[in-house]
Image (tube, rainbow, N blue to C red):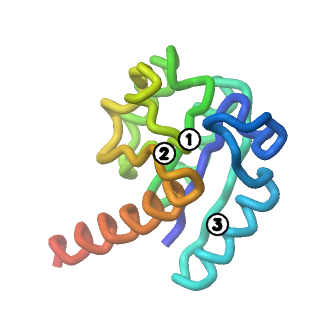
Amino acid sequence: MKLLLIQGANLRSLGQRQGGDYDTPSAVELDATLRRHAERWDYSLEIVYTSSEGEAIDTVYDRVEVGIDGILANPGGFTYHSLALRDCLSYVAPPYIEIHLTNIDRRGIRSALSSAAVGVVHGFGVDSYLIGLEAMLRHLRHARFQDH
């Protein structure tokens, strides 16, 4: 299985933020954890960091064209207003799962992208990513089982 993870605006600075809700490992450390998970569970994971909504949209369409099974994203700064990215994720065939390190409901944030998602995982720190990846794998396996 091929999965794409888009790390949206401001996520390249993970681990550099001071305390609070964002006390997390660096982007490099997070990527290493996620790649180990992919290796252990035998799937391909491409991780793309971008602070450009247009680049995120182009990445989704480019990867769908060459063939991916699922899309996960922590939209970061795109969470608040990215209707164009939401529309893109709604139009493409692969399922999409939204991920957030913090509990965005507790922070009073409404995601502009969540209506395109099959599910949203938030509030568990780095584990939000692992839970999201495992949910995607189960979702895809269930869909394949239903097709046979």
User: Is residue 52 left or right of 128 when viewed as pictured?
Assistant: right
The residue positioned 45% from the left and 31% from the top of the image is 104
The image position of residue 109, as x and y in percent, is: 44, 21
Q: CA distance from mark 3 to mark 2?
A: 13 Å
The image position of residue 92, as x and y in percent, is: 40, 41
Which residue was labeled with disc 2? 99
Say which element carries label 1. Answer: strand
Residue closest to the eye, 46 or 60: 46
Q: Residue 52: which numbered mark, if any?
A: none
Which residue was labeled with disc 1? 74
The residue positioned 73% from the left and 28% from the top of the image is 51
Q: Quadrant of residue 142?
A: bottom left
| Mark 3 or 2, nearer chain start | 3
Mark 3 Cα-neighbour bin, 10 Å: few <14, some 14–19, many ≥20: many
| Mark 3 or 1, nearer chain start | 3
Residue closest to the eye, 131 or 82: 131
The answer to whether one can see residue 89 in this image is yes
Does the CB distance between marks 2 and 1 fall below 8 Å?
yes
Which residue was labeled with disc 3? 34
Mark 1 Cα-neighbour bin, 10 Å: few <14, some 14–19, many ≥20: many
